[in-house]
Image (cartoon, coloured by chain):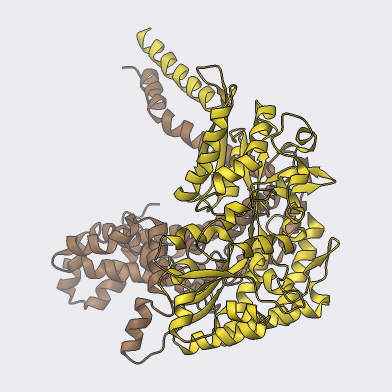
Chain colours: A yellow, B brown
Amino acid sequence: MKKRSGVFVLGGMAIGLVALAGCSSSGSSGDGKVELTFSAWGNPAELKVYQRAVDAFNEQSDSVEVELTGIPNDNYFQTLTTRLQGGQAPDLFYVGAEDISTLISNGTIEPLSEFLNTDASFVKADEFADGLWGASQKDDEIYGLPVDCNPFLMYYNKGMFEEAGIKTPQEYFDEGNWNWEAMEEVTSQLRDAGKYGFVQEGGHGNIINWVWSNGGLFAEDDQIVADENDLTLEAFEFVERMVAEDNFIFSGTLPEGQGMDAMFMSNQVGMVGAGRWLTPMFLETSIDFDYIPWPTNTEEEIPSVNIATAYMSANAKGDHVEEAMEFVSFYTSQVGQETRLDGEGNAVPSVSGIDEVVVNQEKPEHGSYLLDARETGRVVGLEFTSPGLNKELEDIYEVMLLGDLSPKEAVDQAADVARDMLGES
Amino acid sequence: MNDSKRKWWGYFFIAPQLIGMLAFSILPLGFAFGLSFMKWDGFGEREFVGFANYISQFKDDNFITALVNTAYYSVLVIPVGIAAALLVALALNKVKGKTVYRVFFFMPVVTSSVSIGVIWMWLLNGDIGLINQLLAMIGIDGPNWLTDRNLVLPSIAGLSIWWGLGTNMVIFLAGLQGISRSYYEAADIDGASSIQKFLHITFPLLSPTTFFVAIMSVIGSFQVFDQAYVMTQGGPGKASYTLVYHIYETAFGRTAFGPSTASAMVLFAIILMFTLIQFSVSRKWVHYEDGGR
């Protein structure tokens, strides 16, 4: 009898453990506040920045307490979807622009438009910059709010330009000549001085900067037009030639741990293209750097290039959806963004009225270029509405940048794959 | 203790293993098999689509590429891997200080695949990698091992052979030590040479071990994933895109679980087929010392 009861105890414990594991991730805290879980990607420095807004929210709320958990950037979406499938997902979370369409189509995230019109919302839809909605809107319904945004521009190492006696991008810009020809000129000079000119990354979001700054298009009105647009091909040809002639170095050939940020900080490369996210790290070094808009090949002074953004969404199956939406609206509101982005922030506000958080910094000198790039830029839309397409395009560009595929072949293949996968989804 | 009680105790002791296998192997396998006939993005309703997922996979260029790459990788890895492990085991069976050497060869096996991948990414780097630095010393301008589409799979295969050497070597060593000394003594009396002893005693009596290693190598090589995932992400282009990588990418990259599990079932069928072929061919070349099976 004794033995049998032992088995029952063990069995009971096992069932208890399973039941515990099946519990919803949110609940109520001891002081009666509703507890919400929130997950986002980011390095430890970025998570500290996010925590500032979480703390500000918790302080002002009598009824809700939010807890932030970081998930590593690698495989973030895979981790999130696995947790969503298992009913273990947090109440609110970051979603990448390239992934949000998947969660919209399967009804996992809560529509936000109605809530945004209520008094409970800390932000209104019209406060956000127009070009940032991308794939987060479907049939006029909003499913995710842009947490902030990161328009692409270039960082250049002022010290390196001076030392090599090369005219700086800012000088070209002041003359009204900061174009592709100038880009080729400075990167050639940097190369001849024994440095790398520019690090070219391979993903679609990076290549599209060259396409758009040439006036080309990859997609238009929900149609793929890349292979019919001469300006798009011209952009591919330019990037391919720059890499082939060693003006640019393709990041895919760099060894592990030698990314463009490491190369920039160790004075190996003169220029890198990115959003504001590299700024806090670069400020910790003694490197004298500044921003410059993407070089243009059009009539515009500042071309329209890519804006990277993440969205914040509420889990439709969470236990406290209303409270989750309240936090989403706070986190992306003026107050939430100001709390996060002031000082050595890593992004640009996606709402109007708090631009001074970007320009009130002494370094880098030309913070205003980030705001200019936000006004002219846009988020990649159609290409990010098919799960997995981003990776397929990246593979094609990689082969081109390694010299095994001509620009024409790359454009044609990319257009074919995109049409194929968008038709599928 | 009577027989029936003894039997129940037997079941009791194997229960944890049995439950574990049921929960983590048999049930997921059954679930995956069922899923391979469904359309499902990981959320919501599943829709039965018959063989559509299988048909779509065989029409999918990525699946075909993955299949070809995996087959090519296996052809590179299996024969060389087995031969190298056998040679090392033969050498270590006699050498002095064999324990030290065994540790040396076995060390990579207990190192995590991610660490191995990262270290080899450095070693194989075209510009600053140690391998090319060594080649430069003898006047050879080394290639970009991991970014050259023709070299990436052979490079990964080389790393896999090195990585798997320890496991196979230990199994071969165990096999070698299981061969009775009396055969060699008899051969010595008959005046047999070393080569004759190897061909007529060692190799035949080692055949059950070789058979086991061969089966495990086929299974292992068809499931290659870690190296391609860590080192190349299946690239450049799709040059190191393997079958398991395709299964992963289809499931989690495209959130297409139906086609993904269909690919997994095809992989299962391929491995099963090769194992059955090996078993049927084995009757011709595998010799057991006691003549039994």
Q: In the displayed image of the protein, which residue is found farthest to the bottom?
A: B139
The residue sitting at 70% across, 28% down in the picture is A322
Q: Quadrant of the C terminus of chain A?
A: bottom right
Give the image location of residue A248, x and y in percent: 55, 80
Quarter of the image where one finds residue A54:
top right
Give the image location of residue B255, x and y in percent: 68, 50
Residue placed most toward the observer, B29 or A25: A25
B180 to A301, vertically: above or below: above
The residue sitting at 44% across, 14% down in the picture is A8
Give the image location of residue A142, x and y in percent: 77, 43
Give the image location of residue A241, x and y in percent: 63, 85
B279 to A112, vertically: above or below: below
Count of residue discs: 0
- Horizontal arrangement in the rendering, residue B56 relative to residue B86 (left or right): right
Residue placed most toward the observer, B34 or B104: B104
Quarter of the image where one finds residue B118:
bottom left
> Does the rendering let one see residue B269?
no
- Horizontal arrangement in the rendering, residue B281 relative to residue B9 (left or right): right
> Does the rendering let one see residue B65?
yes
Q: Quadrant of the N terminus of chain A?
A: top left
Residue placed most toward the observer, B212 or A265: A265
Q: In the displayed image of the protein, which residue is found farthest to the top?
A: A1
